[in-house]
Image: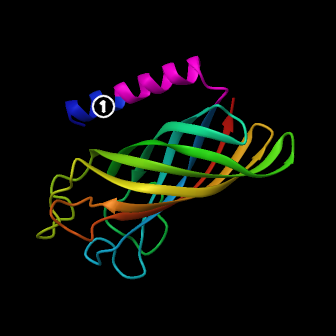
C-alpha cells in the first residue's frame, strides 16, 4: 500500500467517523461477497468472473424515506478471473469511497422496509500484483477507477440485506478503454 492510498483511506474514514457521530441517525456496518466482470475479454475470460469479499460502513444522513449516504467499502478480490467461485483467494485490494442518496421504496411496517439507493463510487487500488495481469497492455492498473451503483435492500429491525450492482465507467487499466469493472455485491449488516 503506498503512502497516498493510506492517507486517502485514513482521511476518508476520519471524515466518515466525524460525520456519522455528528449528524447521522444511522450507521450501517456491512459484509458480503462480490462478483465482478470486465468488458474486455483479456481481463475477464468468457464464462469466468472475479470473486471476492467486502466489508464496509455507510452513514445514513437525514434518515427518513429519503436520505443521504456517505460511506466506504474495502474489497478484497481476484484480479485474474476464475471459472468457479473462489471468494477468499485474492490479490486485488480496493477501497471504495461512496456517496449518494437512498430511499425507502415501500414500508411494510415501522421496522421493515424495502429500500433502494443511487451512489457514485471512487475506487482506490490499495494493492495489486506488480505486473497486473502480466499481459502486454494489462500490466499497469490505474490508481483509481469509478462506477455508479444502485441496488435493492431489505431492512428488518436492525438487520440489512442488500443486493447491489456497480456499473464501471472509468477504466481500471492504464490506456485500456474497455477495462471497467461491473460488480455485483450481496451484503448483510446491521445499522445503529
Which image quadrant is residue 40 in? bottom left
| Magenta stretch: includes residue 154 | no
In this picture, is 189 found above or below 149?
above
Left or right of 112: which side holds 13?
A: left
Name the element at disc 1: helix
In this picture, is 44 found above or below 60?
below
Q: Can residue 90 be seen in this view?
A: no
Could you tell me which residue is drawn at 27 percent across and 61 percent down? 171
| Magenta stretch: includes residue 22 | yes
Which residue is nearer to you in this view: 106 or 45? 106
Task: Find disc 1 in the rendering and name its residue.
Answer: 8
Q: Quadrant of the C terminus?
A: top right
Q: Position of residue 67 (x, y in %)?
A: 63, 39
What residue occupies the far bottom of the structure in this picture? 46
Q: Position of residue 17 (x, y in %)?
A: 50, 22
Q: Is residue 28 visible?
A: yes
In this picture, is 172 found above or below 11?
below
Report the magenta residues as a range. Answer: 10-26
Q: Quadrant of the N terminus?
A: top left
Could you tell me which residue is drawn at 33 percent across and 78 percent down? 45
Q: Position of residue 143 (x, y in %)?
A: 22, 47
Amino acid at each position: 500500500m503506498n503512502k497516498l492510498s493510506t492517507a486517502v483511506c485514513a482521511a476518508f474514514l476520519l471524515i466518515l467517523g466525524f460525520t456519522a457521530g455528528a449528524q447521522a441517525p444511522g450507521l450501517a456496518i456491512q459484509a458480503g461477497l462480490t462478483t465482478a466482470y470486465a468488458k474486455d475479454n483479456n481481463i475477464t475470460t468468457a464464462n469466468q468472473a472475479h470473486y471476492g469479499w467486502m466489508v464496509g460502513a455507510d452513514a445514513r444522513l437525514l434518515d427518513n424515506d429519503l436520505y443521504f449516504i456517505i460511506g466506504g467499502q474495502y474489497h478484497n478480490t481476484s484480479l485474474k478471473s476464475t471459472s468457479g467461485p473462489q471468494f477468499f483467494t485474492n490479490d486485488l485490494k480496493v477501497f471504495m469511497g461512496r456517496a449518494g442518496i437512498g430511499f425507502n421504496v415501500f414500508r411494510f411496517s415501522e421496522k421493515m422496509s424495502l429500500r433502494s439507493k443511487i451512489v457514485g463510487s471512487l475506487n482506490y487500488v490499495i494493492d495489486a500484483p506488480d505486473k497486473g495481469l502480466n499481459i502486454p497492455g494489462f500490466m499497469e492498473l490505474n490508481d483509481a477507477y469509478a462506477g455508479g451503483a444502485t441496488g435493492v435492500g431489505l431492512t428488518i429491525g436492525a438487520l440489512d440485506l442488500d443486493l447491489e450492482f456497480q456499473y464501471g465507467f472509468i477504466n481500471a487499466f492504464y490506456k485500456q478503454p474497455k477495462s471497467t469493472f461491473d460488480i455485483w455485491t450481496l451484503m448483510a449488516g446491521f445499522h445503529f
